[in-house]
Image (spheres, rainbow, N blue to C red):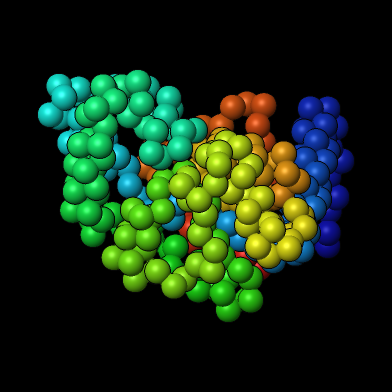
Amino acid sequence: MLKFIRLSGPIRISLIFSQIETGFWGCFKGAVYGKFKAVKHWIFDFDGTLVDSDGYFTRCINYALEPFGRRMERDFIETIRHRHPHQIFDGYIPSEDIPHAFERLKEIGTAVAEEIQTFDGIRELIETLDRRQNTVSIWTGRDRESTLLILKKQGLADAFEKIVTGTCVPQNKPEQDGLMEIQRHYRAKAHEMVMVGDHHHDIAPANLMGCLSIHAKWKKNPHELPHSLKPTHEFYSPFELLTWIKK
């Protein structure tokens, strides 16, 4: 025989709020997932999203600067992140030394290209999107030559239909030039595009354009977004994102 227990006081209130919260998050997650059903075009950032290059940038920059008695300062990356890749040394070393610094940067970049690996699950993620007839593109602030070299070393040179780098457009991230170039290429509507990236320079322009955005938080020390900036969704591993896509 079933027995019903009448709940009152704090226990009853707690259960009511628990049911309300469960219902709210269920509706919220459903609404978010519904938005992604219209997505046809997936755009990925490169460093920190597709490939694990943490530590390599510092190593390469320090090698390039070594003959000039300089080392990469703590805020160097954030200071130059928005610049055209060919301007990263401007104001940092004498202008007559910049060509030599870039020669050394290319030398070390070629040497470490084979060491830089994709994150676990990225290949499966790209293959799944391709089978679903979604387009897969790259938008990175990195220069085109080094981007293509790393992709070639990883056997992924032909995996992306459109690759837009910092040397392909007038203005680098966080300006929207690269994202708009991809939009024009596919003649896509903003709500049909989703930007996947690890930095607010990826998420902010996507949100401003009306695209969906995914904060990729799968590198060792994830970049935290400003509190005022909210992605459409966030995931902690490519496999987690892949599982969610397959639902």
The residue lying at 83 percent from left, 59 percent from top is: 2
Specify the quadrant of the image occupied by residue 101: top left
Q: Nearer the viewer, residue 59 or 198?
A: 59
The residue lying at 15 percent from left, 21 percent from top is: 69
| In the displayed structure image, the side of residue 230 where residue 34 appears, left or right | right
Quadrant, the N terminus: bottom right
**Residue 9 locus on image (x, y percent):** 83, 27
Quadrant, the C terminus: bottom right
| In the displayed structure image, the side of residue 90 where residue 242 appears, left or right | right
Q: How many marks?
A: 0
Relative to 230, residue 34 above or below: below
Q: Nearer the viewer, residue 169 or 234?
A: 169
The residue lying at 14 percent from left, 29 percent from top is: 66
**Residue 53 locus on image (x, y percent):** 33, 47
| In the displayed structure image, the side of residue 192 where residue 213 appears, left or right | left
Q: Nearer the viewer, residue 225 or 62?
A: 62
Relative to 172, residue 137 above or below: below
Residue 183 visible (yes or no): yes
**Residue 124 locus on image (x, y percent):** 46, 70
Specify the quadrant of the image occupied by residue 13: top right
Relative to 222, residue 180 above or below: below
Residue 236 visible (yes or no): no
**Residue 14 locus on image (x, y percent):** 77, 33
The residue lying at 47 percent from left, 45 percent from top is: 166
